[in-house]
Amino acid sequence: MKLESMSFFSLASRKMEWLTARQKVVAENVANADTPGYKARDVAPFENMLTSTTSGTHVARTAAGHIASTDPVAPGLEVVEDEAAWTSTSIDGNSVVLEQQAIQATEISENYRLAASLYRKGYELVTLAVTGIR
């Protein structure tokens, strides 16, 4: 039996995919913190991923100097300008605030750890139900 076929495990897996994609975008924001005109980005909300049917979205390069991303972020995800970005913009038009990116990276890490823990506990519960041995 594949655990991903069970809705709980499927949801936990998709949440971890979303968090991974979000961490990747935060890393790209940090990498482009000194790029003139770069706007901080984020991944569309998790709810969009649950309702989306697209097969994959690529991170767009908005200027030749930006770091290129060759793999899709994740199926059903859209990278958008970060609406929650702090309103400070540097003189060169860059809207990345490293402190905000550090806070986001920490939140993402904590949420990923929680989703992984729930996935593991679900696996332990299924194992206990099937075998009776913990």
Image: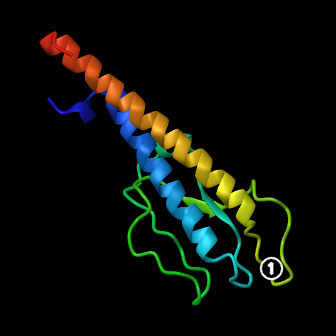
Check the image and report above or below for 83 versus 125: below
Mark 1 neighbour density, 10 Å: few (under 14) some (14–19) many (20 or more): some
Check the image and report above or below for 122 versus 129: below
Q: Residue at x 73, y 85 (%)?
A: 36
Please provide percent x and percent y for residue 39. 71, 72
Residue that carries the numbered disc 1 in the rendered image: 93
Q: Depth check: 1 or 32 in front?
A: 32
Q: Depth check: 69 or 127 in front?
A: 127
Amino acid on which the number 1 mark rests in the picture: Gly
Please provide percent x and percent y for residue 102. 66, 58
Q: How is the image coloured?
A: rainbow
Q: Residue at x 35, y 24 (%)?
A: 121
Please provide percent x and percent y for residue 108. 56, 47
Check the image and report above or below for 121 versus 40: above
* Residue 92 horizontal side relative to residue 60, left or right: right
What element does badge 1 sit on? loop
Please provide percent x and percent y for residue 80. 62, 61
* Residue 119 horizontal side relative to residue 134, left or right: right
* Residue 66 horizontal side relative to residue 126, left or right: right
